[in-house]
Amino acid sequence: MKGEFLLEIGCEDIPARMLAEASRSLGSLLESELKGAGILGEPGVLTYSTPRRLIAHCPNVLEREQDREERVLGPPRAVAFDATGKPTQAATSFASRQGVSPRDLKVVNTPKGEYVAALKRTPGRRWKT
């Protein structure tokens, strides 16, 4: 579901030579924050200005953040599994902290060697209005 967001800032007289940059800065900062939160849809942030107003309009703001997936590195493979390939306490502890089962852990190659990794899924949060 989508919504709309309008920000209007009342100000003292802004000199005409500063209006374009003030408007551009407001739009850039707001767009950066909303994109970072994963809730900005197209066409992005539209800005308008007058000598006494700065306005940012987001016609398409998502109702909830997008779901995120993140690969989290854990202990080295040699520490995470015993000689028979069974998960050690280090692996089960790491899996528990990441909210996954030890059987969901994957071995990944990194520049430092083989490490255990978990795919952590974080569901997007809903906006509170």
Image: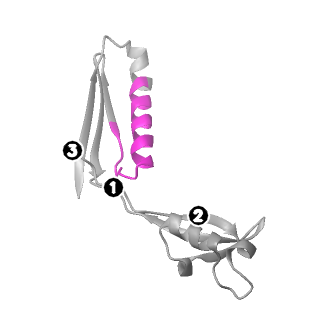
Provide the secondary structure element on which disc 2 rests.
strand
C-alpha separation, residue under disc 1 versus residue under disc 3? 13 Å
Q: Which residue is mark 2?
A: 72
**Number of numbered labels in the structure image:** 3
Viewer-proximal residue, 9 or 121? Answer: 121
The residues tagged by marks 2 and 1 sit, at their Cα atoms, a distance apart of 20 Å
Q: Nearer the viewer, residue 87 or 51?
A: 87
From the viewer's perspective, is residue 82 above or below residue 41? Answer: below
**Residue type at numbered disc 3:** Thr
Q: Earlier in the sequence, mark 2 or mark 1?
A: 2
Q: Could you say which disc has been placed on residue 129 in the image? A: 3
Residue displayed at 45% across by 42% down? 32
For marks 3 and 2 on the same chain, the one whose residue lies earlier in the sequence:
2
The residue wearing badge 1 is: 125
Say which quarter of the image contains residue 57: top left
Disc 1 secondary structure class: loop
Structural crowding at the residue carrying mark 2, measured as other residues with C-alpha within 10 Å and reported as few (<14), some (14–19) or many (≥20): few
In reply to whether residue 64 is colored magenta, the answer given is no
- Dominant secondary structure of the magenta stretch? helix
Q: Is residue 121 left or right of residue 110?
A: left
Please give the range of residues in magenta.
22-46
Quarter placement of the C terminus: top left
Rendering coords of residue 76 (x, y %): 72, 69
What is the secondary structure assignment of the residue under circle 3?
A: loop
Mark 1 belongs to which amino acid? Arg
Query: Percent position (x, y) of residue 90?
Result: 64, 69
Q: Is residue 84 left or right of residue 95?
A: right
Classify the position of the N terminus by image quarter: bottom left
The local crowd at label 1, few if under 14, some if 14 to 19, many if 20 or more residues have their Cα within 10 Å, is: some
In this rendering, the answer to whether 65 lies above or below 107 is above
